[in-house]
Image (cartoon, helix red, strand yellow):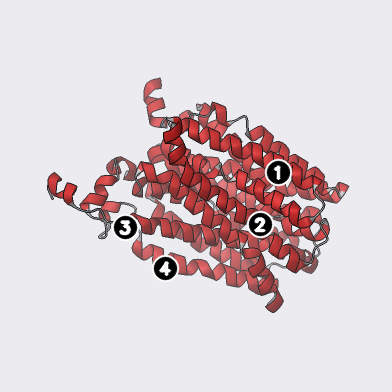
Amino acid sequence: MTLPQVALQKPTRTRNWVIVFAIALAILSYIDRVCMSQAAPHVSADLGLSKVEMGSIFSAFGLAYALFEIPSGWLGDWMGPRRVLIRIVLWWSTFTALTGAAWSFVSLWVIEFLFGSGEAGGFPNITRAFTTWLPADERVRTQGFMWTFARWGGAFTPPLVVLALHHMSWRLAFVCAGSLGLIWVAVFSYWFKDDPREHKGVNAAELALLQNVDQLTARHTKVPWKKLASSRTIWLLWAQYFCSSFPWYFYISWLPTYLQENRHLSQDQSGHLAILPLLFGGFGSLFSGLIASHLARWTGSVSLSRKLLSCTGFAGGCCFILLCTAVKDPTWAMLALGLSSFCNDLNMPGAWGTCMDIGGKYAGTVSGSMNMMGNLAGAVAPAVGGLIIQRTGNWNLFLYLMAGMYFLGLFCWPFIDPVTPLEKEIAAAQ
């Protein structure tokens, strides 16, 4: 087809289905994660687990997720995200289901560790697919949509798990949750292609929107590890994501127990109020993703707009957690935590958009390294929380620590360069 013909042709929107697959994967991943937090009181009672042991169980997932993030992201850069994502979803679905077979602390810890190792790399590989399939001006908005539905999937899991636990054991509930991923794998493996040029639904006009497809679909094994390790932006991306994830992991680990033990709510009441943080977080991601391009035009700078959104998010997250500790009414306290989560997720689209913009063909590895640090926080936070709660019985000490992490994260973004590709930095240094 000649260039004039391409110019007259209306672009197809096949790339939108990539977004649909990403949203579905995000929802499934959060359903499987949040199941354990809601079932924790039942699991603890059945297996005789202490607070410290339960905190260790929560941490096992985060530790494995962190350890396998970079290898899984690198695999996506090397062999393409399709095969890696199929392996990831099959693996995590299997070990979600096997959670119901746990018989002791050690068996549950091993299963959660293997579950986390399987789920690692999901979001970096989706980010790698976005880098190939989406025009640059659609990427941050799409990250906003994906993280919105990820949060909402997790938000509505607690009441569904509570309902399921009224009709089945916690063991069977995990089997049901794990089976959902098999449907996603069947459809995704049939439809998705790593290279949009190989998909029959993509016409020449849509392909013309996807810049540098040749470079971005190229598979490689040589990642510039030295440059990654010496880049100030990379280190600060890691630090800010650790600070963001540390308090956020409270919502998918200790929150139901906090509501039942500290706020003296029933399981049904806690299940309904536990919706709020992830629900509000979804709105935060949606708002940030939609406002980002407008804010960039108003300020004349993509870099400045991302810094403003993220710094606002960290400051607001800190203030609203402190407000929660001062409020006695549990509903108002949860609204405060919901607003803290909203602020937290103002950072999400920009942070992951930065991974795509600076990573380029290394986007899987860069985003994997950032998510590794976030999940190291996920390994540390629940264990530290369990230790604080068991030794002091003071939940507010844990919340103060969470607020402090947001405060530290606030000072990372002013020094991040969120737009300059690593390859340009490498070329300039040579």
Q: Which residue is mark 1?
A: 320
Q: Secondary structure at mark 1?
A: helix
Sequence-wise, the earlier of marks 4 and 3 is: 3
Relative to 148, 247 lies left or right: right
Sequence-wise, the earlier of marks 3 and 1 is: 3
Image vertical order of residue 351 relative to residue 420, above or below: below
Sequence-wise, the earlier of marks 3 and 2 is: 3
Mark 2 nearby-residue class (10 Å; few <14, some 14–19, many ≥20): many
The quarter in which the C terminus is drawn is top left
Query: Which quadrant of the structure image shows residue 153?
Result: bottom right
**Front disc: 3 or 2:** 2
Relative to 30, 105 lies left or right: right
Mark 3 nearby-residue class (10 Å; few <14, some 14–19, many ≥20): some
At 57% from the left edge and 55% from the top edge, which residue is drawn?
Answer: 151
Between the C-alphas of marks 4 and 2, the distance is 32 Å
Q: Which residue is mark 2?
A: 276
Between the C-alphas of marks 2 and 1, the distance is 13 Å
Residue 85: give x, y in percent of width and height.
45, 56
Query: Which quadrant of the structure image shows residue 84?
Result: bottom left
At 48% from the left edge and 46% from the top edge, which residue is drawn?
Answer: 289
Mark 1 nearby-residue class (10 Å; few <14, some 14–19, many ≥20): many
Image vertical order of residue 40 relative to residue 75, above or below: below
Say which amino acid is labelled 3: Thr
Say which amino acid is labelled 2: Leu
Q: Which mark is residue 14?
A: 3
Say which amino acid is labelled 4: Ala
Mark 3–mark 1 contact, CB under 8 Å? no
